[in-house]
Image: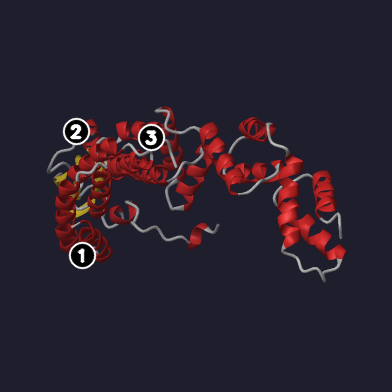
Amino acid sequence: MPSIAQLEKLLALEPGDAFLLYGIAQEHAKANDHAKAVEYFEQAIEADPDYTYAYFHIARSLESLDRNAEAIAYLETGHTVAIRVGDAQGISEISGYLDGLR
Amino acid sequence: MDAKKYKPRRLPPQMNLKRLANDGSEKITGLPVCRDDTARVMVVVDGKRIGRIKIETRNTHELKKSMRWTPELFDALFKEMTRQNALRSAMRMLTLSARSRSDLERTLCWRGHDRDAAIWAVEKIDSIGALDDELFARGLVRRELLRKPAGRRLLEAKLRAKGVSGDITDLVISEALGERDMYADALKIAISGARTMPDSLERIKKVRRLSGRLARRGFEADIVRRAVDEALGGQ
C-alpha cells in the first residue's frame, strides 16, 4: 500500500477527493490511529455523501474508540444512503453490522 | 497483456467530443459546476455534455457561455481533458496500491489513456514527490520475503517486471538479502518440500522436483544443489 505521506501529497493535488480521503482514512485505521481515521472518513463523507463504504468504516473506527452511539448514527445514515443509491451489498453489510452493534 | 482486449469502464472524453460537428458552428451552452466535485465544471456544447474540466482550465481559456466552439478550443480542451482523466486514474491506482513510475505509466496506457497524457500524469505526480520507486521496491521485496524466502534472481525478476531501474533493484535487494543466510533459506524450503514427497519416489525425481522448486524461488544453482543434497541426505 502507498504510505500516508504519499497519499497526503496526492490529496494536495486534488483536495476534497472522496476516494483519496477514504484511502488515507483506511491507512490511519490500519495503523490503529482511529481518531485520525475518523477525521478523514468524515471529510470523505462530506465530499461524497453517497460513499456508503465510508459510513461502514467510520463506524468501525468509532467502535474501536468506544464511541458506539456515534457509530450507530453513522450506520443508520449509511443504511439510508445505501438504499437510496441502490447499493445492495452496502445495505446488507451495514445492516448486519448495525444489528451486531445494537 | 493485450491492450486491445481491455475495455475501460468509463468512456474516454474523445467519445463525447466526436459527437460534435466541431466545425466552429457550435457554441458553449453551459458550464455548470459539477455537483459531486465543486473543483470542476461540465462543458456543455449545443446541449451535449462534453466532459469535465477544472475551474482553473475554464479560467485559463476564459470560457464563457455562448462562446464559439472552435477547433482550436476543441484541441486545447481535449488535451486538458485527456490529461486530467489520466491524472485521476493514476491517483485512483496509487490510492489502491503503491506503484513504480514505469508501472504506473504502463498501466495507464494499457487502460486506454493516451500515452502523452499518461506521461504527463506520471510526471505531475512525481513532481509533488508522491512517487518513490525505492520505497515501492523495498515494500515489494519485504512482502515477498515475508511470504516465503526467495533468492536474488526471483526478486530481480519481480522488480524488473514492475519497471524498477537496475540501480534501485541492486541496492534494495542487497540491503534485503545482506543479512540473510541464503543457504538456510533454501534448505528450509527444500526440507519442507522433501517432507511432502512420498517415500516411494525415486531419489532422482525428488532431486529434480526440489531443484526446480528452489530455482523457481530464485536461488543460485550452487545453493540449490547443496540444499537439496542436505535435505535428502538420509535418503
Counting from the top left corner in percent of width and height, residue B141 is at: 59, 40
Mark 3 to mark 1 CA distance (whole Å): 32 Å
Does residue B202 appear left or right of residue B109 in this picture? Answer: right
For label 2, the crowd category at 10 Å Cα-Cα, with few meaning under 14, some 14 to 19 and many 20 or more, is: few
For label 3, the crowd category at 10 Å Cα-Cα, with few meaning under 14, some 14 to 19 and many 20 or more, is: some
Instruction: Work out whether mark 3 precedes mark 1 in sequence or the reverse, and give the earlier one.
Output: 3
Report helix, strand or loop for mark 1: loop
In the picture, the disc for residue A4 is 3
The answer for which chain carries disc 2 is B
Residue found at x 51% / y 46%: B106
Residue for badge 2: B62
Q: Is residue B45 visible?
A: no
Mark 2 to mark 3 CA distance (whole Å): 37 Å
Residue type, mark 2 in image: Glu
Residue found at x 85% / y 52%: B229
Q: Quadrant of residue B116?
A: top left
Q: Quadrant of residue A5?
A: top left
